[in-house]
Amino acid sequence: LISIAAQAATAIRNSQFYMSLRHQTSNLFITNSVLTAINSTLNLDEVLNIIVTALPHVMSCQKAAIFLADDTGRTARLAASHNLSADFTARATALPIGPNERTLVIATGQQLIINDLRVHEKAPIFQPAAETENFRALAEVPLWTQDKPIGSLTAYYADPHAFTPNEIEELTAF
């Protein structure tokens, strides 16, 4: 009986390892496709749209966005989005950059991980958009050039989401 249990445990571990490896292989394929597409164009809008369109396939999120700072570094705009409403897009044009604003990731250069907006201290900043766009969790990482953040990349989830270190690494790699 112990021998059968040990064999079953090994089979389960092998199955979990296989599924993890399969997921990583799929993500590498998507990332390679994104990089190939990016290298084929010099059009910034096209590159940003490729990224936000591919992100849900890698991160299993429902919505995605890229915000970019203006030349002065005082405001940011939504530069590309996937599955966000036209109203959200229209309102995200001149967002003030600051540590207590929607653009805090650009202001601080620090990632922001919110597993559940209903219980997070930064929830009030995101609450209006969360209600209209129907998301409960988000992961946002800064986009860098040389030594300063120039924007952010955000993955939105409809339900609370426990982010793994691998997911944050994948988002940062994008």
Image (tube, grey):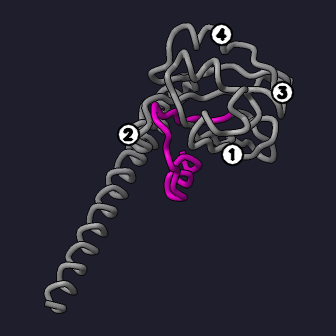
Point out the tag, 3 or 2, that comes first from the N-terminus.
Answer: 2
Is residue 173 a member of the stretch shown in magenta? yes
Q: Is residue 173 above or below residue 108?
A: below
Mark-to-mark CA distance, 2 and 1? 21 Å
Which mark, residue 91?
Answer: 4
Q: Report the residue at 33% width, 62% height from top.
A: 20
- The amino acid on which the numbered mark 2 sits, given as a three-letter code, is His
Numbered circle sitting on residue 88: none
The tag earlier along the polypeptide, 2 or 4, is: 2
Mark 2 closeness class: few <14, some 14–19, many ≥20 residues within 10 Å: some
How many residues crowd mark 1 within 10 Å: few (<14), some (14–19), many (20+)? some
Give the quarter of the figure containing the N terminus.
bottom left
Nearest to the eye among marks 1 and 3: give it: 1
Q: Is residue 22 left or right of residue 48?
A: left
Q: Is residue 146 above or below residue 18?
A: above
**Which of labels 2 and 1 is toward the front?**
1
Q: Which residue corresponds to mark 3?
A: 73
Residue 111 circle label: 1
**Gap between marks 1 and 4, in whole Å?**
23 Å
